[in-house]
């Protein structure tokens, strides 16, 4: 039974991380589904969310588990503005150009933050960090991870509800289904796309805020999560938000098990190998059937 | 017009070769080497990304394989120029594998797949310290023993000239027209009998070979490489930004892009210090919003305004009818 408890522990840790991945992936999937663009600014948005709640924590002392609301709100406004001011102006929205624009924007945000805050690593200290819940004799759960898991799960369910049960969600799904017929049905495509981009950015920002207590903070922190969100979106079926959510949880568990048996440094490599396999064997994704 | 272009290019390259006679400062020569190196890399990328319209964001893979090929093979006792050549062969092999898998995909899927391959290579190089030196890095032999920076500069110019002549030749050949046909409409290209996967793969192979040689030069100048430097996604992005800034799918675009980008980054290096990529981002956003066909593309269009109808690459597309869109994306289902 020596292998049993570490394995269960790893799966549990993977699920806890996976909920945050799911939030990041859902934001990306919403943007991809509604706009058919790959958002290379996603990592920068996540990093920005981290810095917002970091500054908020330093100024007011309110911890990120409440401060994530501020991150989410600010990132929503930024995402909305980016769409309205920049993305909308690309004629015909050729995906080549959109990818280039989001790449450039990501560079501006990342290096702008580096200019303001410097490239140093930061970390915040909460009393909560040392708290652990024990389940039985062998398994323990770290309190901040559990808290962020619960918050991320609630938000993910909320986002799913918004997409499936509101007028906005219906309009978003209509655009994803057919971008040419939906304006004829009276949908304000620009507005819906701008709100979707805002929500996607907010999801990344909130995930960043929730990661702040358990992660180091530096300007390029977002890029690894951005790469993972690509993996999730492809794994879940491009544009399916529930697919991306499940893919996030699976990715968390796979990474955790890889770290346990093969070493932490291989986790990301395994992600990409899965990604290439899925892209070449089943490009419609594994978990998603219906597009968001 | 074409003759005039040819003469202009010849004069430009001959003058560039004469620069070391006038410029004595090693520092300036190193910057100029960078300009030509990225012009060559941009020209190489342009074959796949510009002419064939396949947005590759994984060229760091070939760059890195070229760099590591030179470093590791010469460490194993092979002479440095032979290892440069073998590194190029390795890059060709990896390009063949990457191309076979990723060219089955289109649009953003293709871009993501190339990123994934480059990242896998980077992580493997990082995680096998016994072979590659891992994160600590590995030493690279100097390719030129005498007056090295001058020799690097000359070889940079020659590599660019080679890539330029190759591009000019491809642009007028049947092969080049195949590539452009694929960019404009891959399904139509296929329907008129172009073996699109073959043509795309060949363009990637040519591109990867030049990129690998560029990577080897770059590594040899710095004498020391780490995976996060030569195989990072930042390198892929930089290689792609150069031609897109100048004008993707144009002959002079990568040259102009490299001159503008490297000069700007040199000027702003002292202002922004570590945040030197900021200026790349600003330039990219300006170009996408105001000059969507790149610098050279916009100039060419302005000149053509008085002649025939423009056929610039990456102009705004007419919205596709839904049923066409459904056919194009059919492979997803």
Image (tube, coloured by chain):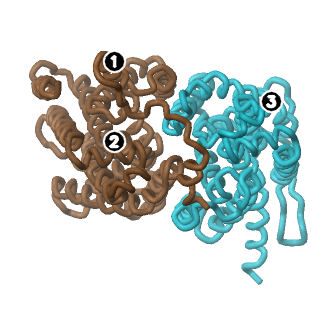
Dividing the picture into quadrants, the one containing residue A39 is: top right
Residue A260 screen position, x and y as percent: 66, 68
Residue A123 screen position, x and y as percent: 71, 38
Residue B9's place in the image compared with A131, above or below, is above
Q: Can residue A54 be seen in this view?
A: no
Q: Is mark 1 on a helix, strand or loop?
A: loop
Q: Can residue B114 be seen in this view?
A: yes
Tell me, for residue B305, which label it has, or none.
Answer: 1
Alpha carbon distance from label 2 to label 1:
22 Å
Marks 1 & 3 on one chain:
no
Residue B218 screen position, x and y as percent: 29, 41
User: How many numbered circles are shown?
Assistant: 3
Residue under numbered circle 3:
A73
Image colour assigned to chain A: cyan
Q: What element carries label 2?
A: helix
Indicate the chain on which mark 1 is placed.
Answer: B
Indicate the chain on which mark 3 is placed.
Answer: A
Residue A155 screen position, x and y as percent: 85, 45
Alpha carbon distance from label 3 to label 2:
42 Å
Q: What element carries label 3?
A: helix
Image colour assigned to chain B: brown
B251 sits left or right of A87 in the view: left
B177 sits left or right of B60 in the view: left
Alpha carbon distance from label 1 to label 3:
47 Å
Marks 3 & 2 on one chain:
no
A129 sits left or right of A122 in the view: right
Residue occupying the point 26% across, 51% down: B206
């Amino acid at each position: 039974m020596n292998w049993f408890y570490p394995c269960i522990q790893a799966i549990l840790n993977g699920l806890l991380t996976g909920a945050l991945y799911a939030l990041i992936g859902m934001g990306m999937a919403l943007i991809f589904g509604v706009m058919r663009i790959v958002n290379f600014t996603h990592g920068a948005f996540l990093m920005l969310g981290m810095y917002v709640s970091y500054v908020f924590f330093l100024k007011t002392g309110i911890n990120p588990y409440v401060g994530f609301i501020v991150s989410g709100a600010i990132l929503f406004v930024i995402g909305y503005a980016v769409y309205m001011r920049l993305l909308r102006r690309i004629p015909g929205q050729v995906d080549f150009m959109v990818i280039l624009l989001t790449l450039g924007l990501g560079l501006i945000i990342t290096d702008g933050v580096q200019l303001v805050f410097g490239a140093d690593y930061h970390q915040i200290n909460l009393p909560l960090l040392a708290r652990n819940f024990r389940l039985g004799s062998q398994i323990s759960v770290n309190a901040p991870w559990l808290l962020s898991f619960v918050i991320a799960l609630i938000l993910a369910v909320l986002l799913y509800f918004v997409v499936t049960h509101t007028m906005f969600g219906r309009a978003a799904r209509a655009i994803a289904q057919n971008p040419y017929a939906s304006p004829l049905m009276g949908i304000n495509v620009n507005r819906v796309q701008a709100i979707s981009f805002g929500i996607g950015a907010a999801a990344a920002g909130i995930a960043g805020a929730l990661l702040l207590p358990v992660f180091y903070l530096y300007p390029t922190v977002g890029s690894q999560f951005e790469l993972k969100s690509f993996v999730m979106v492809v794994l879940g079926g491009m544009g399916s938000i529930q697919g991306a959510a499940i893919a996030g949880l699976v990715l968390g568990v796979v990474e955790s098990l890889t770290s346990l048996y093969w070493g932490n440094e291989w986790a990301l490599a395994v992600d990409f190998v899965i990604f290439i396999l899925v892209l070449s064997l089943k490009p419609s994704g594994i978990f998603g059937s219906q597009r968001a | 017009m074409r003759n005039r272009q040819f003469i202009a290019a010849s004069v430009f390259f001959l003058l560039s070769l004469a620069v070391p006679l006038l410029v004595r400062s090693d520092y300036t020569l190193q910057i100029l080497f960078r300009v030509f190196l990225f012009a060559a890399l941009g020209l190489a990328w342009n074959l796949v990304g510009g002419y064939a319209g396949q947005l590759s964001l994984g060229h760091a893979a070939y760059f890195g394989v070229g760099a590591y090929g030179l470093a590791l093979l010469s460490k194993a006792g092979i002479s440095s120029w032979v290892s440069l050549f073998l590194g190029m062969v390795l890059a060709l092999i990896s390009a063949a594998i990457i191309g076979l898998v990723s060219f089955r995909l289109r649009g953003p899927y293709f871009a993501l797949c190339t990123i994934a391959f480059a990242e896998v290579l980077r992580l493997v190089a990082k995680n096998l310290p016994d072979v590659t030196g891992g994160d600590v890095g590995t030493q690279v032999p100097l390719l030129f023993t005498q007056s090295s920076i001058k020799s690097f500069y000359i070889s940079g110019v020659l590599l660019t000239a080679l890539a330029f002549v190759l591009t000019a030749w491809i642009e007028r050949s049947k092969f080049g027209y195949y590539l452009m046909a694929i960019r404009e409409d891959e399904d139509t290209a296929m329907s008129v009998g172009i073996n699109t996967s073959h043509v795309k793969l060949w363009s990637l192979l040519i591109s990867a070979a030049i990129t690998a040689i560029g990577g080897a030069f770059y590594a040899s100048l710095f004498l020391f490489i780490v995976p996060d430097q030569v195989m990072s996604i930042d390198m892929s992005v930089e290689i792609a930004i150069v031609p897109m800034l100048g004008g993707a799918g144009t002959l002079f675009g990568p040259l102009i892009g490299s001159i503008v980008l490297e000069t700007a980054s040199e000027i702003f290096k002292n202002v922004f210090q570590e945040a030197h990529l900021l200026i790349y981002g600003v330039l990219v956003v300006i170009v996408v919003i105001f000059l969507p066909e790149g610098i050279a593309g916009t100039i060419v269009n302005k000149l053509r305004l008085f002649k025939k109808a423009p056929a610039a690459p990456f102009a705004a597309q007419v919205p596709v009818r839904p049923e066409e869109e459904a056919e194009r994306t059919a492979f997803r289902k």
